[in-house]
């Protein structure tokens, strides 16, 4: 199956020319190749990405995450519509480490963002998850580059899953936005310190109707909580605001804060420094992924693992010794 080559594949030049000509259909077809695990597609994907690289990197990349029920899709649609009205082209990418099991879980975003999804200036794409967050980051990162080369100057990357997916998105974006709710008990309960520290802006969503007072209280609580954290390397002090996606209140302020942040990090040099750091980290992610595929893709390793599993269950060998033993065998295979 790995050596299978789909009949409908075009030349790399056809995809590259289409992407640079801002052809959305060709963009989608190229992203499908990026997400493929076929060996022939991997080679094609590398050629496409390498060729469009000089035309990428010119967008502002915004990561968006939030607690369950916070209204991420509604907020992203309102935010995306505002950006389009300001003359921007917006690409929305979803990143979900659970989608390998649930398959269509992130496809719902496209149907929920009905108004935004029909606009020529907006592009919504669920991201392939792979088996690990490293794989997610790599493929979403390449998709992001293709979208930039296709003319999208604002990239919104949404985390749909929970846990370490936020870290993966933070590691590939310029500005990290955390959506929160008010009126759900102690506002600081259940929010991880790590996510708070990553955030460049906290937005209390659904700040309308009877929830306005609670939203203002939550805003003060989060502002107080953020004062505990040291100033980030970017030199930016995280901002807390309220918004209502359904009433279109506070949406423009989010973009204003993004622009203020961009002006600051451009001036102090952090923007380029952070992008360079992310590129290097991306290389190491790729190395780790390739090594993992080489290891688990080996027929000899698969046979050895099957035997070691039986020996571990029967207490003939400890898990630690088994791991060292099979890694030694893997290393020795390169010396033969």
Image: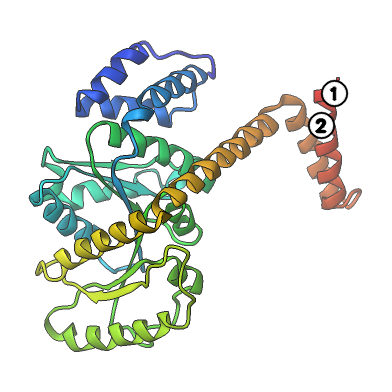
Q: In which quarter of the image is residue 32?
A: top left
The picture places residue 62, in percent across and down from the top left corner, at 32, 54
What is the CA distance from the residue labelled 1 to the residue labelled 2? 7 Å
The picture places residue 99, in percent across and down from the top left corner, at 42, 47
Picture residue at 22% right of the left edge, 46% below the top: 110
Callout 1 touching callout 2 (CB < 8 Å): yes
The picture places residue 11, in percent across and down from the top left corner, at 35, 11
Picture residue at 30% right of the left edge, 87% below the top: 220
178 on left or right of 131 = left
Q: Which of 311 and 82 is in front in this view?
A: 82
Does any portion of residue 9 appear in the rendered image?
A: no
Q: Which residue lies furthest to the right in this view?
A: 316
291 on left or right of 25 = right
Give the answer, above or below, for where 157 lies relative to 66.
above
- Identify the residue under disc 1: 335
Query: Residue 331, labelled with which disc?
Result: 2
């Amino acid at each position: 199956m790995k050596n299978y080559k789909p009949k409908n594949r075009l030349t790399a030049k056809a995809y590259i020319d289409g992407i640079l000509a801002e052809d959305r259909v060709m963009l989608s077809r190229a992203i499908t190749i990026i997400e493929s695990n076929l060996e022939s597609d991997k080679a094609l994907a590398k050629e496409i990405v390498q060729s469009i690289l000089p035309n990428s990197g010119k967008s502002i990349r915004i990561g968006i995450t939030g607690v369950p029920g916070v209204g991420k899709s509604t907020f992203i649609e309102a935010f995306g519509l505002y950006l389009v009205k300001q003359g921007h082209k917006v690409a929305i990418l979803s990143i979900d480490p659970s989608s390998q099991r649930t398959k269509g879980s992130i496809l719902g975003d496209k149907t929920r963002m009905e108004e935004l999804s029909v606009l020529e200036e907006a592009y919504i794409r669920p991201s392939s998850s792979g088996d690990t967050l490293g794989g997610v980051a790599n493929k979403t990162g390449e998709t992001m580059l293709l979208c930039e080369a296709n003319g999208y100057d604002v990239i919104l990357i949404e985390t749909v899953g929970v846990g370490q997916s936020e870290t993966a998105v933070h590691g590939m974006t310029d500005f990290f936005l955390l959506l929160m709710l008010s009126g759900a008990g102690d506002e600081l309960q259940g929010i991880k310190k790590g996510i708070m520290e990553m955030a460049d802006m906290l937005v209390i969503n659904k700040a309308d109707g009877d929830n306005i007072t609670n939203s203002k209280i939550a805003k003060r609580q989060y502002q107080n909580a953020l004062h505990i954290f040291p100033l980030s390397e970017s030199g930016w002090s995280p901002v807390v605001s309220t918004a209502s996606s359904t009433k279109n209140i506070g949406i423009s302020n989010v973009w204003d804060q993004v622009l203020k942040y961009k002006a600051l990090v451009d001036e102090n040099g952090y923007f380029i420094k952070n992008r360079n750091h992310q590129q290097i980290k991306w290389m190491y992610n790729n190395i780790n992924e390739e090594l993992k595929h080489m290891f688990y893709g080996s027929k000899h390793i698969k046979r050895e693992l099957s035997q070691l599993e039986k020996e571990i269950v029967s207490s003939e060998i400890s898990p630690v010794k088994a791991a060292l033993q099979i890694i030694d065998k893997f290393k020795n295979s390169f010396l033969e």
